[in-house]
Image (cartoon, rainbow, N blue to C red):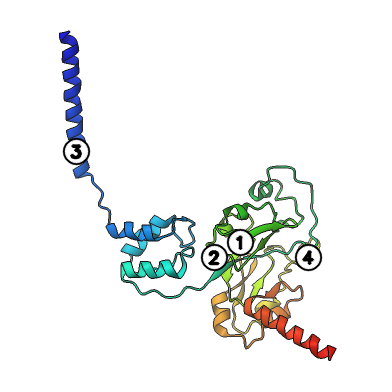
Amino acid sequence: MLLVLYSILALTGLGFVAAALLAVASRFFAVYEDPMVGKVTDTLPGANCGGCGYAGCEGYANAVVHNPSIPPNLCVVGGAKVASAIGTLTGKLTTEMEPLCAYRRCDKNAGQVATRFDYKGIPSCAAAAALHHGSDQCGFSCLGFGDCVKECLTEALHVENNIVMVNEAMCIGCGKCTKICPRNVLQLIPKRARVAITCSTQDKLKAVMDVCKVGCIHCEKCVKTCPAKAISMEKKRIHIDQKRCLASGDSCGQACAKACPRHILRLHGPAAVAAMAEACDKEQQKAV
């Protein structure tokens, strides 16, 4: 009986000692949490999409609170309302961000890109790309299994005829789809961009012409034609510096798109709308 009693007392004593040690440790090793970070985190939508450039909402909240150079308008999901709220909390000036959208750098259906073999594996772009560089003859095309669709926060993407389609009106520009695409077919561009590139190939000339009727052959006529020097070759792909392009204005008349023999550079946004309106006017004049 005494043995049982002593055991209970010993265990109770050990419990009190452990509790005391934990209490002391919690004081010495306590991590200070800035309450402002918590307020900003609560203001953010909690999507943890990474569109702001940080791993998650809490990471961005910590940065915007403690780093004076981080603006309050990086949350693409929350938009202007959240940016204004964060600006009020942190005392930072809120400026309007350039609205972005995903753009598909591939038109394999128009290019009549054939398949090399019938893929029967896991319905995933990542899995298909890992098997002999994909089933398409073009090694840089959209594989069309919709990995990006599953990542999209706003249902702005869907697969149609084995290629992803982007609803730019619904896209919030978070960039999650661009990160999941194994072939970098999707990229973010300003919604008001005048010209965009519809090909992601890194091949040249005959290697492109043999597999795609509308693929970029890297003739670089667009590079030479652009008066703003906004087009260049980067990582074996044509690249448009959209900021420089937009800053130069439309006085060039989208010369790069007109110079492209394969029609890879296509009018986008307001420029595309204006071109369509002009074409309609000409058709009406011919009818008269």
Q: Of circles 1 and 4, which is in front?
A: 1
Please name whichever residue, 137 or 143, is drawn nearer the observer in this view of the structure.
143
Mark positioned earlier in the residue sequence (4 or 3) = 3
Asked if 141 appears above or below 277 in the picture, the reply is above
Distance Cα–Cα, label 4 vs label 3: 69 Å
Give the vertical position of 60 relative to 225 (above or below): above
Amino acid type for the residue under numbered disc 2: Ile
Q: Which residue is mark 4?
A: 110
Q: Earlier in the sequence, mark 2 or mark 1?
A: 1
What residue did someone put label 2 on?
A: 172
Q: Position of residue 129 (x, y in %)?
A: 67, 50
Q: CA distance from mark 3 to mark 2?
A: 47 Å
- Please give the label number shown on residue 156: 1
Q: Is residue 75 left or right of residue 263?
A: left
Circle 2 residues within 10 Å: few <14, some 14–19, many ≥20? many
Mark 3 or 1, nearer chain start: 3
Mark 1–mark 4 Cα distance, whole angstroms, equals 22 Å
Residue 264 position in % (x across, y down): 72, 71
Residue under the image location 74 percent in, 66 percent down: 215
The reply to whether callout 1 and callout 4 are in contact (CB within 8 Å) is: no
Question: Which of the two marks, 3 or 1, is nearer to us in this view?
Answer: 1
Q: Earlier in the sequence, mark 1 or mark 4?
A: 4
Q: Earlier in the sequence, mark 2 or mark 4?
A: 4
Q: Amino acid at mark 4?
A: Ala
Find out whether the residues at labels 3 and 2 contact each other: C-beta distance under 8 Å: no
175 or 204, which lies in front?
175
Give how far apart the Cα atoms at labels 2 and 1 are.
8 Å
Quarter-of-image position of residue 267: bottom right
Identify the amino acid type marked 3: Ala
Q: Is residue 20 above or below residue 278?
A: above
